[in-house]
Image: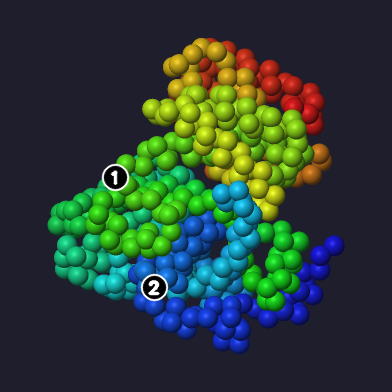
Amino acid sequence: MVNISSTKMSLPLLSPTLLNERSELLPNHQQLLALPEKIIQFGTGVLLRGLPDYFVNKANQQGVFNGRIVVVKSTNTGGTDAFADQQNIFSHSIRGIENGSQVDDFVINSSISRTLSAAGNWADILQCAHNPELRIVISNTTEVGIQLTDDDIFASPPASFPGKLTAYLYERYTAFNGSEASGMVIVPTELIVGNGPKLKSIVIEQARRHNLAENFIQWLQEANHFCSSLVDRIVPGKPDAETIHALSEKQGFRDDLLIVSEVYRLWAIEGDSYVRSVLSFADADKGVVIEPNIDLFRELKLRLLNGTHTLASGLCFLHGLDTVSESMENQETAEFIANIMLSELAPAIPYNVDPKQAQEFGNQVLDRFRNPFIRHQLIDITVQYTAKMKMRNIPTLLSHYQKTEDVPVLFAKGFAAFLTFMKPVVHKDGAFYGERNGQPYSIRCDSAAYFDEKWKNAASPIDLANQVLSDVTLWGTDLTLLPGFADAVKENMVALVASGTSTL
């Protein structure tokens, strides 16, 4: 068993002090730490740090972008904060296969200048709007983060992300008297189709609900660029203890903010030449693509990588597996993943995609899933399970039935596993937990209470399936009207319940 506590006691913490003592870790760190703030980022998650922040850091080291990031945390965490302890410096392990060769890189990322809590530092966050050099907004607040709510943008802070953004932009408009040059380039990375225009429409609606000046709304529409974007890189949650220990010993320091990722990277951003000029960090890495239309990138990634993740995560987890790589090592689950991706999802993508291109992308995704260095926890993929299923997979299911009335049997099996996974058996402190092999697991989904009520009142798994599948409010359509689909889901649910979910 790895003794992490002994590692913490024996190794120094990654920080500017350590970089001063070991200049070989980041030779030009003093110049990098002195760069001006040019980006405000809503979110501290590993995906943002592993992709957008990675690109910014790489550009800074090449002398291309020369700007740092102010990060906004949604909550004011109590106790020791790793960002404060390490003064926002963190390390990034990048391992996998690229162009047939094994890659094992280790990067010190110094792109973040400050980490501010929305709950505790809202005045400081608004003050950032007065900085003329800070012209970029990045966000990742999960799929449910970009929603129109009954928010108060004059609160300290507003509750929702769009509310916070509206307040921030109003502060900037006021600070610069509505000048065109003060407009921002805003790049949401939430996995929502058309995330840029959707966020823009919500911000404008918030402005109208709060009776803000029409000139401000005109400034929002004309001086700001809300760019749809797509992020694609597997960056799992916190590494396991063994990985942390091994990397800490290898590098000679500990890092409580350590992230790991695969080599593959893509940030596709919808924008013109002006957007490219502002997002100049794009010149540092081919993984940043700025084009007028990114629909193809979005559909391939959303339907094949994310869609497969969503349909397979619950099934593989209930099968007794814990990570994506373990699922690819198991013959039964590996066949399920490959077949549902290439045989059912790829032909049904609701977009005009060359079938050969879809197959090539799918095979590339399967190689990424097999990456032995990445321990992507299945339970993490199930976060906001219902919203992900609706957004990533229901459009593909409907497209399938537009092309054929053949029942997508693997899709039905994955959906049945989703319904089974979403059965709470334990309630504790307002949270919901399912059970696998006698052990509880967390159901981290905004629809957990909905499923708790449905499972309690359902006469049987078949009854539960009928109620949920026919819920137009939940799915936007009645899924029981799809020929044969409901029957296939119910058959799989009965099999899962009868087998104790121990077999496929």
Tell me how far mark 2 sits from mark 1, CA to CA.
26 Å
Callouts 2 and 1 close, C-beta under 8 Å: no
Q: In front: 434, or 262?
A: 262
Tell me which amino acid carries mark 1: Pro
- What residue do we see at 42% from left, 41% from top? 297
In the picture of the structure, the residue carrying the numbered disc 1 is 292
Question: Which circle's residue, 2 or 1, is located before the other in the chain?
Answer: 2
Kindly identify which numbered label has been placed on residue 502: none
Residue 179's place in the image compared with 224, above or below, is: below
When asked about the image quadrant of residue 52, the answer is bottom left
- What residue do we see at 67% from left, 29% from top? 336
In percent of width and height, residue 75 lies at: 51, 63
Tag 1: Cα neighbours inside 10 Å, few (<14), some, or many (≥20)? few
Residue 245's place in the image compared with 416, above or below, is: below
Task: Tell me the quarter of the image containing the N terminus.
Answer: bottom right
Tell me which amino acid carries mark 2: Gly
SS under mark 2: loop
- What residue do we see at 77% from left, 39% from top? 320
Task: Tell me the quarter of the image containing the C terminus.
Answer: top right
Residue 50 in sight in this render: yes
SS under mark 1: loop
* Image-based side of 337 in relation to 345, left or right: right
In percent of width and height, residue 411 lies at: 59, 25
Q: In front: 218, or 49?
A: 49
Can you name the residue that lies furthest to the bottom here? 21
* Image-based side of 40 in relation to 311, left or right: left
Tag 2: Cα neighbours inside 10 Å, few (<14), some, or many (≥20)? few
In the picture of the structure, the residue carrying the numbered disc 2 is 63
- What residue do we see at 19% from left, 70% from top? 176
